[in-house]
Image (tube, rainbow, N blue to C red):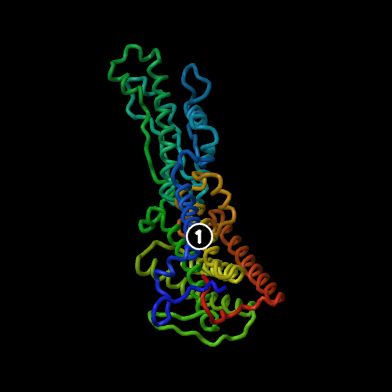
Amino acid sequence: MSTAIPPSAPDGRASAARVLRRWKLWIAPGVLSALVTLVLSLLYMGGILTPSESLDRLPIAVVNSDAGAPLPGQQTNLGTQVAAAVSGGTPEGQVEWRQLDRAAAQDQLDSGKVYGALLVPEDFTATVAGLTTTQATVRPALTVLTNPGMGSLGSSLASQITQKAARQVSVTVGQQLTASQALAGAAPTTKLLLADPVEVRTQVGHPIGARTGLGLSAFYYTLLLVLAGFLCANIVHSGVDTALGYADTEIGPWHTRRPTLPISRTKTLVIKMVMTAGLSVLTTSLIMFATITILGMDAPHGVLLWLFSYCACLSVGLGVQAINAAFGSIGQLVAMFVFIALALPSSGATVPLEAVPGFYRFLAVFEPMRQLASGVRSILYFDARADAGLTRGWIMIGIGLVVGVVFGFAMTRYYDRKGLDRMVPAPGPHPA
């Protein structure tokens, strides 16, 4: 018995209503659409909703330069007490307070290894002690340094945490001062001032250019590279299949199909990968032309940025071609999850990896966008320092290229050896 949809119109063509009534037609699109939508919603929103609650060892430097003698009755000066207080003033495991000297802290700010820093000045204890005398002229201050190159959210989180810790230090110092016997007869206004005596200043620890999107240009530039590699590869994939006669060409009402050219899967993949490598030169150059020349994005190290961008696009493009060759018609969906859906929330470029749930930190170990974002961020914001993520970016690009090529050709050669040639659909009635 035939399962084809019988025609219902006088000209022998099926009606839309009859086709839509076939419930089997709805199953695959419905299930796939629902699953993709659900997974994307969970992935994207799950990584951004609770950054403060998901904090895991966010690195912040503490610089204690206080050289003053301890106050009467105390064994350590106030700078040492401040350094100890901030370390114990945040929930365990949320922040990694790094006790560094000024030079080391600046180096880690300049290489993107810390999101901010708290500076205790050399005269902190002496200035606090001066508040108990009538000759006090300077208010003690703690300085919070931000690192906008690590992204606006990451820098903001670190700044909020550090300022909160500094405020708590001020309250603690104030309690010590107001309890001092030297202030027993002080005026109420003086005691009120000394209850919160420490000024908290905020400065930029590692400045970046004005045309950097507040530290977001690295993320969006990386996104452009991934999208360009993904789209270029899929356009080449469809174009080659059309030219070889394995896919139809339909533009508006015009429909054509070329004669099928007998060719192995492996040779087809060679064609697609070579074309992807060639066209990636064009896409990379156009991305840089648009973002730097037309829009004026701050982008030092232009030659290095172009080379890194090309290799990034190429790595993504060859990976997409390998996945399409291995999975066929669902390859684009698989590639979309590998290079975009799973990569975006685990990139660490907008929300710090230290502020996302553990699942995303696991993805960040191998997902390509995290590796590319680290390299781009190093080039754009941190003077292309190797230890700022550039070395990791190059290594992971190389691994991605090798994995993509090996996986793609391993699958196509396997299919060819098994005689699983690409077949052209035979004409006939469409099954229900």
Where 126 falls versus 24 (above or below)?
above
Above or below for 287 versus 43: below
Total labels: the figure holds 1
On the image, the x and y values in percent for residue 19 come to: 44, 69
Where is residue 265 drawn, in percent x and y? 63, 77
The answer to whether any part of residue 311 appears in the image is: no
Q: Is residue 325 visible?
A: yes
Residue 35 image position (x, y, % from top left):
50, 55
Mark 1 residue crowding within 10 angstroms, few (<14) / some (14–19) / many (20+)? few
Q: Among all residues in the image, which is located at the extreme front? A: 1
Q: Nearer the viewer, residue 31 or 388?
A: 31
- Residue 68 in picture, x, y percent from top left: 47, 28
Q: Residue at x 38, y 40 (%)?
A: 202
Residue at the location (44% across, 83% down)?
255
Please tell me which residue lies in front, 337 or 121.
Answer: 337
Q: Is residue 319 found left or right of 46 in the rendered image?
A: right
331 left or right of 266 in image: left
Does 162 appear above or below 43? above
Comparing 151 with 79, the one in front is 151
Q: Nearer the viewer, residue 198 or 259?
A: 259
> Residue at label 1?
32
| Residue 175, picture quadrant | top left
When asked about the image quadrant of residue 318, the answer is bottom right
Mark 1 lies on a secondary structure that is helix
